[in-house]
Image (cartoon, rainbow, N blue to C red):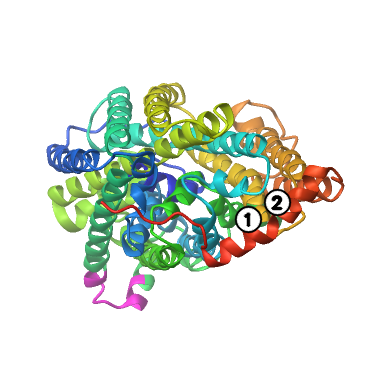
């Protein structure tokens, strides 16, 4: 769950690393062993492993493993989802963005929040009423199971893979920086712990680890923001005025602009962040952990509140870092640059306002955050393989629960090994790019198919298949041909595709493909699929026939 945090907001927050540059990318200066941080970390891991043991005693079925038996309340789920988004990348990345660019950081945070009403009003209730374990249950509700589940599972696994890379690299860099441990040791440690959480505790353990982590992160960030405001006598005007005085850019930090280079990139980024959120498999899975659609709506309501509050805190922390960190030589190297890069601004601020033990606390929580995100991603990947591919495609819905659960656990171990391998292999890779790609793929493949399956009666299997694959392939191709990969990674002089973010184009391709190949489908099966829309619509609105909670 902690790993999910880095993922969810990682989607968004890890992207800030793209603009903020810094610690989670490229070379990192290994720091001396941080005893306080390691003690805090071991205490957290010990507590979460106890939770995992407790949860393992309650995992008796696939429903328990995938969705905690539908026993999570709306408030608990909202806090867990918020934990997903309030990742270490978000905490470190957005505060770093504010530290370097000022006002732009707030614009970015607000822009990200816009995705949540989309989920609330368009997705959450219908998703809970129509699905069981994964969003593929919903997308294939009235369409051909084999084709749609294969597409959905493929899209999910691609998103999960890119996220896992980002999380594992981020974890390694953070631990190298904060704990003084070797990068490879950190990556292997994260891999082992994430497998343990998922393998034994399933969604119940993952949820509670996420909740605890969210509470700890909110508490720590609240304390930091409080100490910053105390420093300026709780006067926002004074905070901004002092920041303008000491920042290298002066008054420019209070002006918007600079996040993206052109309007097309801005629109593409906005679309990816808004609609990619509604296509992330590990987020969508969470709506099946509550008992009914009412609790699903509550989940989004509470999640939006917690995330909004957290973003306000990161804004204060960013400006606090300008005042208390940028002016303190102990946080800088010989060249005058921030130790560890700009992404460490929040960590240094923790040291400035609370000393070494509070620094240890924040460091441990940041790492715990990564763990939660990774665990959530692993669970989403395992469910895509076992529930969608194995049980529904290979066994055509006739697999028994014991076999499905066994395949899920085998997949979990395999994903853990894969994540460790990818983390070591991509040590030098730009993690912001990985997350951006995951977001764009989710918005271009998963979201269009899921959205139209619930809202458009003329959707057919042919349309969903061709359009979904077109969106997936277009997003990946344009990202490869864009400036980030073609120029920065592959070393070519000029990008073939001039924009950094492909979502605007790949989403148009996906929706157009789905629409065209659906309306031109005159087959008998297409007519039957259109006829099944009304029963689906009734269930999505009423919940009649939806699976309920399982008593523990």
Indicate the quadrant where residue 43 lies.
top left
Percent position of residue 156, x then y: 54, 38
Work out whether residue 44 or residue 447 is closer to the camera in this orientation and state it. 447
Work out whether residue 388 or residue 261 is closer to the camera in this orientation and state it. 388
The numbered mark at residue 271 is: 1
Q: Decide: is 255 above or below 143.
A: below
- Residue at (37, 28) in percent of width and height: 409
Work out whether residue 334 or residue 131 is closer to the camera in this orientation and state it. 131
Indicate the quadrant where residue 22 lies.
top left
Percent position of residue 549, x then y: 36, 55
Percent position of residue 41, x then y: 18, 40
> Badge 2 local density, few (<14 within 10 Å), some, or many (20+)?
many
Q: Decide: is 386 above or below 120.
A: above
Q: Is residue 232 magenta?
A: yes
- Residue at (60, 32) in percent of width and height: 488
Our reading of the magenta stretch's main secondary structure is helix
Residue contact between numbered discs 2 and 1, judged by CB atoms under 8 Å:
yes
Q: CA distance from mark 2 to mark 1?
A: 7 Å
- Res 459 seen here: no
Does residue 167 appear to the left or right of 127 in the view shown?
left
Does residue 517 appear to the left or right of 66 in the view shown?
right
Does residue 543 appear to the left or right of 418 in the view shown?
right
Q: Which element is circle 2 on?
A: helix
The stretch of residues the image draws in magenta is: 229-239
Work out whether residue 444 or residue 404 is closer to the camera in this orientation and state it. 404
Circle 2 residue: 504
């Amino acid at each position: 769950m902690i790993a999910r945090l880095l993922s969810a907001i990682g989607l968004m927050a890890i992207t800030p690393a793209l603009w903020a540059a810094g610690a989670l990318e490229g070379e990192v200066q290994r720091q001396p062993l941080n005893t306080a941080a390691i003690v805090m970390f071991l205490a957290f891991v010990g507590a979460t492993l106890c939770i995992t043991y407790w949860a393992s005693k309650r995992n008796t079925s696939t429903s328990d493993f995938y969705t905690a038996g539908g026993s999570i309340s709306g408030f608990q789920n909202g806090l867990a989802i918020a934990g997903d988004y309030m990742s270490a990348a978000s905490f470190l990345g957005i505060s770093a963005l504010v530290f370097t660019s000022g006002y732009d950081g707030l614009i970015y945070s607000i822009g990200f929040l816009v995705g949540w009403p989309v989920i609330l009003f368009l997705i959450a209730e219908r998703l809970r009423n129509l699905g069981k374990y994964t969003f593929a249950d919903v997308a294939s509700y009235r369409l051909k199971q084999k084709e749609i589940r294969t597409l959905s599972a493929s899209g999910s696994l691609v998103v999960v893979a890119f996220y896992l890379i980002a999380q594992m690299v981020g974890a390694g860099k953070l631990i190298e920086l904060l704990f003084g441990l070797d990068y490879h040791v950190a990556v292997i440690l994260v891999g082992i712990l994430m497998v343990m959480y998922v393998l034994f505790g399933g969604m119940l353990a993952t949820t509670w680890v996420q909740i605890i982590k969210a509470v700890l992160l909110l508490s720590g960030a609240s304390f930091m923001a409080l100490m910053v405001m105390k420093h300026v006598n709780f006067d926002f005007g004074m905070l901004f005025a002092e920041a303008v005085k000491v920042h290298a850019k002066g008054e420019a930090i209070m002006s918007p602009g600079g996040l993206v280079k052109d309007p097309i990139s801005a629109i593409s980024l906005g679309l990816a962040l808004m609609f990619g959120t509604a296509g992330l498999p590990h987020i969508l899975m969470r709506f099946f952990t509550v008992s009914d659609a009412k609790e699903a709506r509550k989940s989004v309501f509470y999640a939006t509140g917690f995330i909004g509050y957290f973003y306000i805190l990161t804004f204060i922390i960013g400006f606090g870092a300008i005042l208390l960190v940028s002016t303190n030589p102990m946080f800088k190297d010989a060249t005058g640059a921030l130790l560890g890069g700009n992404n460490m601004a929040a960590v240094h601020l923790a040291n400035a306002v609370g000393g070494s033990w509070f620094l240890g606390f924040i460091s441990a929580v940041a790492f715990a955050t990564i763990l939660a995100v990774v665990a959530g991603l692993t669970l989403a990947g395992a469910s895509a393989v076992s529930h969608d591919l194995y049980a529904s495609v290979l066994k055509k819905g006739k697999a028994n629960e014991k076999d499905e659960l066994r395949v899920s656990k085998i997949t979990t171990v395999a994903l853990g090994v894969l994540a460790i391998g990818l983390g070591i292999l991509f040590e030098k890779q730009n993690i912001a790019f990985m997350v951006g790609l995951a977001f764009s793929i989710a918005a271009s493949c998963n979201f269009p198919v899921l959205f139209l399956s619930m809202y458009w009666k003329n959707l057919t299997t042919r349309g969903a298949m061709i359009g979904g694959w077109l969106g997936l392939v277009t997003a990946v191709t344009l990202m490869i041909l864009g400036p980030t990969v073609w120029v920065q990674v592959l070393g070519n002089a000029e990008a073939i595709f001039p924009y950094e973010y492909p979502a605007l184009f790949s989403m148009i391709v996906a929706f157009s493909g789905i629409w065209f190949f659906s309306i031109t489908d005159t087959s008998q099966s297409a007519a039957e699929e259109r006829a099944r829309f009304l029963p689906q619509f009734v269930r999505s609105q009423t919940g009649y026939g939806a699976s309920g909670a399982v008593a523990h």
